[in-house]
Amino acid sequence: MAMTDPVVEEGPELDPTDPYAREAQTFPRLRREMAQRVAAYGREERMPKDTMVFQRGDRSVDFFLVLEGSIEIFETDVRGEPFVVTVHGARQFTGELDLFNERQILVSARTGDDSRVVRIGRADFRRMMSSESDIGEIIMRALILRRVGLIRHAQGAVLIGPAHGADTLRLQRFLTRNAYPHRLLDTDANPDAGGLLACCQIAAAQLPVVIAPGDRVLRNPANGILADALGLTETLDPAAVFDVAVVGAGPAGLAAAVYAASEGLRIIVLEAIAPGGQAGTSSKIENYLGFPTGISGQALAGRATVQAQKFGARLAIARAVAKLDCDTTPYRLYLDDGRPVQARAVVVATGARYRRLAVENYGRFEGQGIHYAATAMEAKLCTDEEVVVVGGGNSAGQAAVFLARTARHVHVLVRASGLADTMSDYLVRRIESSRRITLHARTEVTGLEGDNFLRQVTWKNRETGMSETRPIGNVFVMIGAEPNTEWLDGCLALDDKGFVRTGQDASGRALASPFATTTPGVFAVGDVRSGSIKRVASGVGEGSVVVQAIHEFLNPGVA
Ligand SMILES: Cc1cc2nc3c(=O)[nH]c(=O)nc-3n(C[C@H](O)[C@H](O)[C@H](O)COP(=O)(O)OP(=O)(O)OC[C@H]3O[C@@H](n4cnc5c(N)ncnc54)[C@H](O)[C@@H]3O)c2cc1C
């Protein structure tokens, strides 16, 4: 559609190179020529003053560009009173990252004057974002900055509970990793949570609770229930048939989603918790190509998620797949609430979980002193310090020998009576001959203490009952990893540790793709794959490469 040039003042235009133009980048005013190009993707509408454009809680809201007049974005405060967050004038536009998904939106909008706007539906919005790349870049940056602003300032949810409590931490991690605005009221520091406990009739024993927008109180909800209450997850149509379902949104699954969606496949990602997987729990990944100063796993996952959704990938979070029915065509994946999702091809990207120690405070120090890898990066963290390595296998032995080069002392803790049965001879000899390594047999960790970081470790000899506590801030837990493959239940060949075998059929003949499993159309990538290198980069590589094999499976001979 043609847009008549509105008679408006020239506002400040975006200069993306100006580092001080944060406000202008968050609420840019498009150049007239750009606004005209955007308008061609939608239809013009007139809206009298005070027309509701959209409301908090709506899903799949359109994109609006103001031509004349204004759109006010508003929230409601704790007393339920509306307050205006920002006003979009001529050539400014509505929306934030929820334009790319079907989550319930967090703010409302109404016209501030009699207005003329362009409304662009979701499909046309995505078309515009990829076709008009210069404008797409400005809009994408604004949408990301707006989400960051919402996380910092929006009312969102209120989480009430003891800050160090395991369930409070679980809920806080869930909200944080899904970029949902929230505030924690720590009942250790503020036992009546500013009067909220009394006013909502919540007993201390019921903590933690989440007060969702609309004042709905959820008592220690499971992640899935919280996601539903906050409108965080997509509504799924059981009749829809996707080209491909990716199970798991770690680095491997997200890479598969970006490449599959960008190459036109109809794709859904089903994720049990939140995007990012194990990498999402890493405070800084320093060895991923292109990030010389490192990037947090969450930032990497957040970017990848938006990238996948920009290309049209659907993402259902807090939706664990409980079973794959591989006898049907298309394949049926049953979620943990029993609902089916149908897809012609499946990518298994459910990763692995490192075996953990059953010790109090363990989760609190994961990534803050508890490590699952001993690379140069971790070694640097403990230069001239004492460290603990838990485990009696080769990975533990290698870690101990490696760390002994820089650490002041390495304590190797094993529950068995020695290392001979589980570790290679050469490693056992090196450990025994090193003055910097002490082997503690029949010993296990019994206590972990600290503040934001691990500061002190206690271990106990199971035979003598003697305990020892030392000021140690780094523990390397090397007791193996377990694949997340229970849900595959007999559909595919697994190796003796439960990882998915790929690249060979049941009789050992090579398959067309190194990521093909023994079931046609079902592929496996990343840590879940037997023999994989357990790194972010290898997961991303496998996730992107597997898409070629999916094309070949869906359209033989065409790809
Ligand atoms: C603390 C920590 C720090 C690390 N640091 C580094 C580093 O610096 N550099 C590096 O290269 N590597 C690092 N790694 C290793 C790296 O994170 C992993 O190799 C990588 O995340 C594997 O990616 P993935 O996608 O294969 O699997 P994962 O990251 O394990 O993701 C799998 C996803 O599948 C989901 N899932 C599981 N079961 C189901 C189901 N039934 N239904 C739906 N979803 C399911 C999980 O919730 C998860 O989100 C680190 C790992 C940890 C734990």
Image: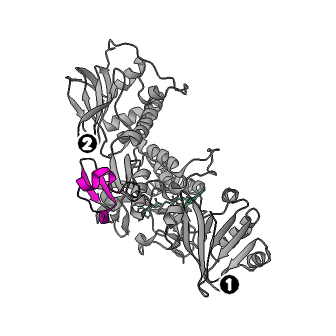
Q: Residue furthest bottom?
A: 463
Front-lying residue, 490 or 372: 372
Front-lying residue, 39 or 250: 250
Q: Residue at x 45, y 68 (%)?
A: 519
- The answer to whether any part of residue 239 appears in the image is no
Q: Is mark 2 within 8 Å of ligand 1?
A: no
Residue 525 percent location from the top left of the image: 52, 61
208 falls in the magenta region: yes
Mark earlier in primary sequence (2, 1): 2
Residue 318 percent location from the top left of the image: 36, 58
Residue 257 percent location from the top left of the image: 46, 51
Q: Residue at x 57, y 47 (%)?
A: 295
Between circles 2 and 1, the one closer to the viewer is 1
Q: Is residue 215 above or below residue 371?
A: above
Q: Horizontally, is 67 left or right of 516 in the view?
A: left
Mark 2 falls on what kind of element?
loop
Q: Horizontally, is 469 left or right of 92 in the view?
A: right
The kind of residue on which mark 2 rests is Asp
Q: Which residue is mark 2?
A: 58
Mark 1 residue crowding within 10 angstroms, few (<14) / some (14–19) / many (20+): some
Indicate the quadrant containing the N terminus: top left, top right, bottom left or bottom right.
Answer: top left
Residue 148 percent location from the top left of the image: 43, 40
Q: Is mark 1 within 8 Å of ligand 1?
A: no
The kind of residue on which mark 1 rests is Gly
Front-lying residue, 194 or 42: 194
Mark 2 residue crowding within 10 angstroms, few (<14) / some (14–19) / many (20+): some
- The answer to whether any part of residue 374 appears in the image is yes
Magenta part of the chain: 191-218
Q: Which residue is mark 1?
A: 418
